[in-house]
Amino acid sequence: MADIENKYEDNVAGAYFVDDQCIDCDLCRETAPANFTRQEDGGYSFVFKQPENDEERAQCEEALEGCPVEAIGNDGPGG
């Protein structure tokens, strides 16, 4: 499970985040491209925009559930 204490500073404030366990597999960016992007220099993904509607929330949840290293977390409604 993702650890809020180890989340990347690149993540925007809010419920969803990516921590330092990310292996840059691209799953989250493919699943929820409106919310996840890649940090090119560091080689990891992060949340650049929190979900703004039910479809985006569903895609973020799918990414969270599908993450092979459990690097995506949901810290609740406000983060």
Image (cartoon, rainbow, N blue to C red):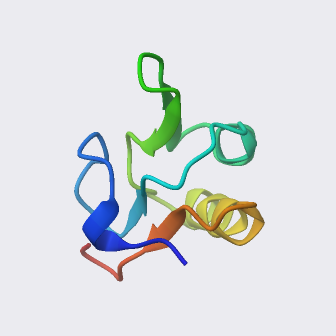
| The one of 79 and 51 positioned closer to us in this rendering | 79
Answer above or below: position of 16 versus 21: below
Q: Residue at x 77, y 64 (%)?
A: 66
| Quarter of the picture holding the C terminus | bottom left
Q: Quadrant of residue 74?
A: bottom left
Answer above or below: position of 34 versus 76: above
Could you tell me residue 2's position as x and y percent? 48, 71
Q: Is residue 59 left or right of residue 78?
A: right
| Quarter of the picture holding the N terminus | bottom right
Q: Quadrant of residue 18?
A: bottom left
- Residue pushed farthest top? 41
Answer above or below: position of 69 versus 76: above
Count of numbered labels shown in the rendering: 0
Q: Is residue 65 left or right of residue 73?
A: right
Q: Residue at x 39, y 54 (%)?
A: 50
Q: Residue at x 75, y 61 (%)?
A: 68
Could you tell me residue 38's position as x and y percent? 51, 28
Q: Quadrant of residue 15?
A: bottom left
